[in-house]
Image: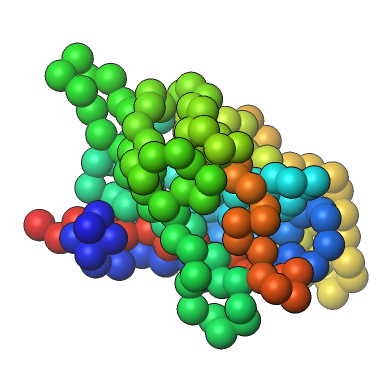
Amino acid sequence: SLHDALPILHRTLIPLLLLLPGVALAADHAEAPGTSADPAADIGDLYAWHSGESMVTVLTFNPFGAAGAENYDADVLYSIHIDSDGDNLPDHEIHARFGQNMAGEWGIQVVGLPGATEATTVGAAGESIDAGGGAMIYSGVKDDPFFFDQTGFNETLATGTLAFTATDAVAGLNVNAIVFEFPFADVVGADGTLQVWTTTSRLES
């Protein structure tokens, strides 16, 4: 399988406990030098929410990207792990990786997407892909939704008094995003909760 072929070298473990409709998120922009040097595998954020019958997860990578900068890499596996029974082990796993056709155009391949009518879904990067059964996929470059007041943070550290300047240090920067939408009923636990986390893996040379 794709997962077995790609040992985990980069990771962001971001457990999200979803109890009620709404959004949960976690950020991980600043990394150790080794991870930052591999932007295609460097996770920025994981967002997850559900509304009505649908659940959405958004994995961003390549944080602090220049406007319009794509960073696809066929040797990186992107995974969303979902624990539905509270044992901290995945009960559902969604795996995605990018690849190019003979014309050099990038596409995305996804396996394990809940609700999808096929075991494997393939489509063009940068376009919305209907996987059937209420499942959708999107991948592409987007404005980074993360907000960080670096100026206020530095002032708080320097003075010991909480400071907020409303200055967004990541304004104008982009991330690559992989978005999955799928039926919430296919993953939610019997008690109405679940945990979500994400990892990236790189093919060893």
Residue nearest the viewer, comparing 187 with 13: 187
Residue 109 against residue 82 in the figure, above or below:
above
**Residue 42 visible somewhere in the drawing:** no
Q: Looking at the picture, tell me which residue is in the foreground, 199 or 117.
A: 117
- Residue 90 in sight in this render: yes
Residue 174 x, y percent position in the rendering:
55, 34
Q: Position of residue 2 (x, y in %)?
A: 25, 55
Q: How many marks?
A: 0
In the image, what residue occupies the spot 57% across and 31% down? 142
- Looking at the picture, the colour scheme in use is rainbow
The image shows residue 37 at horizontal and vertical percentages of 33, 53
Quarter placement of the C terminus: bottom left
The outermost residue toward the left is 205
Q: Quarter of the image containing the N terminus?
A: bottom left
- Residue shown at 20% from the left, 23% from the top: 101
Q: Is residue 86 above or below residue 146?
A: below
Q: Which residue is pictured at 83% across the width and 55% down the height?
A: 21
Q: Residue furthest top?
A: 103
Up-down relation of residue 74 to residue 107 (above or below): below
- The front one of 35 and 187 is 187
Instruction: Indicate the position of residue 20 as horizontal and vertical percent values.
Output: 83, 62
Residue at x 74%, y 46% (from the top left corner): 53
- Identify the image quadrant of residue 202: bottom left
Side of 53 where 163 appears, left or right: right
- Give 153 or 93, whichever is nearer the viewer: 93
